[in-house]
Amino acid sequence: MCAWPWGYNNTFLSEYYLATGDQEVLHAISEYAITSARGQSWCGTYGHGMAWPKPDGSSTHGIVPPYGALNQAGLLVSIGIVLGDKCGIKDPEIAPAIERSRRYFGYFAGNPLIYTWSKVRGAGPVTFSPNGTSASSNSTAALTIPGSYLLKLTVSDALLGDTEGYGGVSTNLTVKFKDGRNVTDRPPAATPQSVTLAEDTSKAIKVNDGTADSEPATVAFSMGGLAAGIFSEFYQWPDLSSPEPWPDMASRQPDTTRIDAKMQLAAAEFPPNYEDHFCSRHTGYLKIVTAGDYQFSISADDHAKLWVDGKLAIEQYYSKKGWNAGALPLSPGYHEFKLEYMESYGGNYVNLSWAGPGVSGGVPAGAFFHLTSGR
């Protein structure tokens, strides 16, 4: 068996099948892919010929004839096996052959693995740099909000393409940030692990896929800026007269922005020339000290809505019945909030209150924080 035509033939037939679905060629693809996998040497190479069958047909994965490895021929055969796998060819020899090829050609390609970090959930935004490249095996995760984060690392193979079924690694890291605490390490592991950081500190942790020869990936965590107050945006809206439909403030640039200390605004506390036909958006984080159920309420003229941790909590209307989600269970830490307010004409004010473990009345100024960057 000659490796050169087998590599070309299998690649051509597999591409043809994937493009057309013609079942007539599947038998030939199967023969090429399975026999090529059996004919691979123990280290993932091919020569002019294959390592199996030997003249006596006795064993597989020996030494390739007649005088050692030929990378160009071997690359073609390896691509043919990968494409055969994509065509649905099943045999116990297929996956090990792909892995041997990956390791062998990966030596020449440098690091063929692509490391992609992402946030599954958490108290605030996370930015990874670098990300989605082989260089991101060592990445930095920039965070701004102390809290608990679940991060995900996905490793894919740049050399052989999609690694699903043979070598893909997906690992979750649980990362907790607390004020004024020391850094706590955990050893490399494939299972979820955690690290605790003080604000304005950084620490790297490693993760691997749990196998003895895996290369660990490293992510370093750094805290960004969080300041007291609410980020407020104000919009002149001349045709605003009804809450239906609700004004889409995200589609416009605000006319005025500022930082407010609290979420109790009387008529005189709005910016100049904001009396009628305007709306505003107020965003940031609520700092919860004690875990428990918190009941929020809004009084407003005319209308307002509140979201907590991305979920709508209150719809408050001046002239009709509103809606309230009821008590919200909140853990200690920082919880994202957004309050949107609209005023058509007449009086204008908006007040946010809460009731929970040890608190009641208007939410105090010390409970509000906003991002200093990355909004």
Image (cartoon, rainbow, N blue to C red):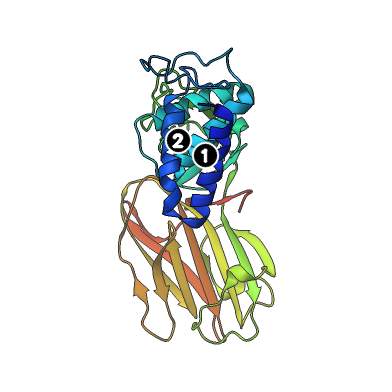
- Disc 1 marks a residue whose amino acid type is Asn
Residue 23 visible at all: yes
Residue 217 visible at all: no
Q: 280 above or below 150?
A: below
Residue at 47 percent of width and 19 percent of height: 51
Residue at 43 percent of width and 18 percent of height: 61
**Crowding near the residue tagged with mark 1, few <14, some 14–19, many ≥20 C-alpha atoms within 10 Å:** many
**Is the Cβ of the residue at disc 1 closer than 8 Å to that at disc 2?**
yes
**Crowding near the residue tagged with mark 2, few <14, some 14–19, many ≥20 C-alpha atoms within 10 Å:** many
Q: How many circles with numbers are drawn on the protein?
A: 2
Q: 3 and 272: which one is in front?
A: 3
Place residue 175 in its image quadrant.
Answer: top left
Residue 211: x and y, percent?
A: 39, 22
Looking at the rendered structure, the secondary structure element under dot 2 is: helix
Q: 317 and 170: which one is in front?
A: 170
Considering only order in the chain, which callout, 2 or 1, is on the residue closer to the N terminus? 1
Residue 331: x and y, percent?
A: 35, 47
Left or right position of 365 against 108: left
Looking at the rendered structure, the secondary structure element under dot 1 is: helix
Left or right position of 234 against 306: right
> Which quadrant, please, contains the C terminus?
bottom right
Residue at 52 percent of width and 37 percent of height: 80
Left or right position of 195 against 347: left
Residue 2: x and y, percent?
A: 54, 27
Q: CA distance from mark 1 to mark 2?
A: 7 Å
- Disc 2 marks a residue whose amino acid type is Ala
Q: Which mark is residue 10?
A: 1
Q: 31 and 370: which one is in front?
A: 31
Q: Which mark is residue 350?
A: none
- Residue located beneath label 2 in the image: 33
